[in-house]
Amino acid sequence: MEQKIIGRKEKITLPELGLNLVWAKIDTGAYTSSLHAEEIREEELEGKKVLKFQILMPKHQKFTGKTLVFEKYREKKVKNSFGQAEIRFLIETKIQLAGETYRAEFTLTDRSSMKNSILLGRKILRGKFLVDVSKTNLGKTYRKKK
């Protein structure tokens, strides 16, 4: 597969989470992708453990306030932006970027003090994309071709 060139910020779609064309920061320094989530909790639903959470921040223009429920999830140890290890919940979901659809893993964390609610790390990018840090939203050119 030919590698596509994307910018330092891209509009992505996370269809299973109900998000269409939201900004994500491309971070080649991060291995794992992350997503801002609030009210993250494990609950028992019909005898099964599930993970419930809300995505994005209430002030975000695409915030829905909808609580998402995932049956398939796990915990992962990651280093945060300050280099400290922490345990985060990790989900897998579809992502659409530059005209392609992939399965991707996202850790859930509080990114309210960060500029971007969604961060895409190397695991998603490797072998698929090259990053031109001087540009943004280069993926839109690939979306139009479909």
Image (spheres, rainbow, N blue to C red):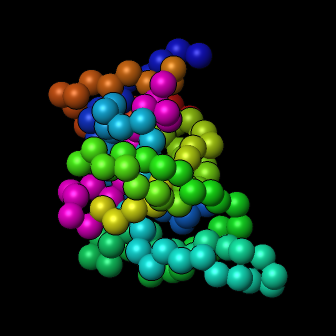
| Residue 72 or residue 140, whichever sits in front | 72
Q: Residue at x 18, y 28 (%)?
A: 134
Tag count: 0
Q: Residue at x 54, y 66 (%)?
A: 18
State which region is magenta. Answer: 112-126
Res 78 visible: yes
- Is 118 contained in the magenta span? yes
Q: Residue at x 31, y 37 (%)?
A: 27
Residue 63 location in percent, x, y? Answer: 39, 74
| Residue 119 or residue 48, whichever sits in front | 48
90 relative position to 35: left or right = right
| Residue 78 or residue 106, whichever sits in front | 78
**Residue found farthest to the top:** 2
Res 138 visible: no
Relative to 28, say whether 55 is above or below: below
For the N terminus, the quadrant is: top right
63 relative position to 18: left or right = left
**Residue found farthest to the right:** 47
Quarter of image, res 103: top right
Q: Residue at x 49, y 33 (%)?
A: 123
Relative to 68, say whether 7 is above or below: above
Relative to 1, say whether 146 is above or below: below
Residue 24 location in percent, x, y? Answer: 35, 48
**Residue found farthest to the front:** 85
Quarter of image, res 39: bottom left
- Is 88 contained in the magenta span? no
Residue 144 location in percent, x, y? Answer: 46, 36
For the C terminus, the quadrant is: top right
Relative to 46, say whether 32 is above or below: above
Residue 60 location in percent, x, y? Answer: 30, 70
Quarter of image, res 44: bottom right
